[in-house]
Image: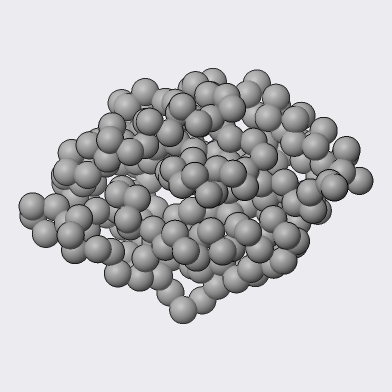
Amino acid sequence: MKSKTFLIGICGGSGSGKTTFAHKVLKYIPQEAVSVLHMDSYYLPELPQSHYTTTGKPNFDHPDAFDWPLIRSHLEQLKSGIPVESPIYDFSQSVRTNDSTLLGPSKIIIFEGIFTLFDHKIRDLLDIKCFLHVDSDIRFTRRLHRDVKERGRSLESVIAQYYDTVRPMYQKYLDPQRQYADFVVGEETDVASQILAARIVELYRDSL
């Protein structure tokens, strides 16, 4: 029996270019057939204080910062062709809003985020698993520009957060996810995005 929906996981550290890579892939896929689910939307309304830094800052780069039951539930529904109300997270205020975005039903769901390959139940749902392996200096620079320009953070706070949580959490939890990927993508993503898109289109057409 052919799957109603194909789930594609794109994983990588903060600043690795996950969203950019996903949009490159989208250029080669029929737009009416695909939706993108951002893991960043699923931060918990309140992060566990047990993982706060020594300076009292929340740890957004720990797996426990995410609402795993809701993520699993939404992915299972999307896999079954059922639309979901994806939450909206306000990064300038670091809060989950009361608003949501209707997502699906779609034949293809691209699920991108820092822990898309972390949970074994979610890995079992994914039809293709991709990991972006990008040099730490490049990831840090991208994150710095993004958080200052788009999320209203100060230069000092971004640097402090990187050394307090981003770098150690990447080494402990993020990088080990590479072992679960079907393929690993480096900094050059143009060709890789075409290869991934070609495979997705193949799955999509075979299901019609």
Is 159 on the left-hand or right-hand side of 94?
A: left
Q: Quadrant of residue 205?
A: top right
Relative to 32, say whether 103 is above or below: below
Q: How many marks?
A: 0
**Residue at the outermost bottom position:** 98
User: Residue at (22%, 37%) from the top-left corner?
Assistant: 168
Relative to 130, say whether 30 is above or below: below
**Residue at the outermost right position:** 208
Coloration mode = one colour
Is 89 on the left-hand or right-hand side of 63?
A: right
Is 43 on the left-hand or right-hand side of 70?
A: left
**Residue at the outermost left position:** 54
- Asked whether 122 or 83 is in front, the reply is 122
Q: Quadrant of residue 142?
A: top left
User: Residue at (91%, 46%) from the top-left corner?
Assistant: 208
Where is residue 112? Give x, y as percent. Answer: 53, 46
User: Residue at (50%, 31%) from the top-left corner?
Assistant: 180
Report if residue 57 is visible in the image.
no
Is 93 on the left-hand or right-hand side of 111?
A: left
Report if residue 79 is visible in the image.
yes
Relative to 127, say whether 57 is above or below: below
User: Residue at (32%, 27%) from the top-left corner?
Assistant: 136
Where is residue 202? Give x, y as percent. Answer: 82, 33
Q: Quadrant of residue 90?
A: bottom left
Where is residue 88? Give x, y as percent. Answer: 49, 67
Where is residue 72? Give x, y as percent. Answer: 53, 59
